[in-house]
Image (spheres, rainbow, N blue to C red):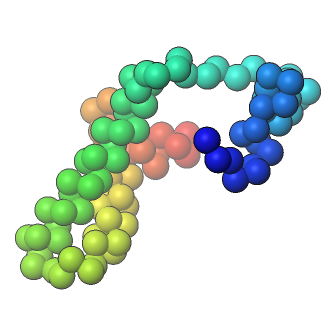
């Protein structure tokens, strides 16, 4: 495997530079288990929802495919401003601000 020489991801004496820094600062890392994708479920679902909304918005408005970045930004904005049941009907922005 070829590395890009990023010091944060190259293991030195068993740990990366980032892991050494966390240990020095007293930060305890909670790493996800190897070869599992379950811990990413919420973020992956949100990302897929943004992609689905962006595609639906672009197609229903009859916009050209070249405008997908703008529709994705608009869909992400709408997602972040919409209340969610899982957040007690607060928007992700409200949860982040509190």
Q: How many marks?
A: 0
Q: Write the residue at 42% across / 44% down.
A: 92
Q: Is residue 28 above or below residue 67?
A: above
Give coordinates of residue 62: x percent, y percent: 10, 79
Q: Write the residue at 79% across / 26% down.
A: 15
Which residue extends farthest right?
24
The quarter of the image holding the C terminus is top right
Q: Is residue 96 above or below residue 31?
A: below
Q: Write the residue at 46% across / 22% down.
A: 35
Nearer to me, 61 or 93: 61
The quarter of the image holding the N terminus is top right
Q: Write the residue at 72% across / 39% down.
A: 9
Q: Is residue 43 above or below residue 75?
A: above
Position of residue 60 in the picture relative to residue 6 (left or right)? left
**Which of the 4 image quarters holds residue 61?**
bottom left
Give coordinates of residue 39: x percent, y percent: 44, 24
Nearer to me, 84 or 8: 8
Q: Is residue 64 above or below residue 18?
A: below
**Which of the 4 image quarters holds residue 29?**
top right
Asked if residue 82 shows in the view, the reply is no
Asked if residue 80 shows in the view, the reply is yes
Position of residue 68 in the picture relative to residue 73 (left or right)? left
């Amino acid at each position: 495997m070829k590395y890009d020489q990023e010091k944060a991801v190259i293991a030195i004496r068993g740990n990366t530079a980032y892991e050494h820094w966390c240990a020095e600062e007293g930060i305890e890392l909670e790493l996800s288990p190897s070869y599992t994708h379950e811990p990413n479920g919420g973020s992956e679902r949100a990302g897929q929802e943004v992609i689905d909304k962006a595609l639906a918005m672009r197609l229903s408005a009859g916009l050209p495919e070249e405008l997908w970045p703008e529709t994705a930004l608009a869909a992400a904005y709408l997602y972040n401003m919409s209340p969610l049941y899982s957040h007690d009907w607060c928007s992700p922005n409200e949860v982040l601000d509190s």
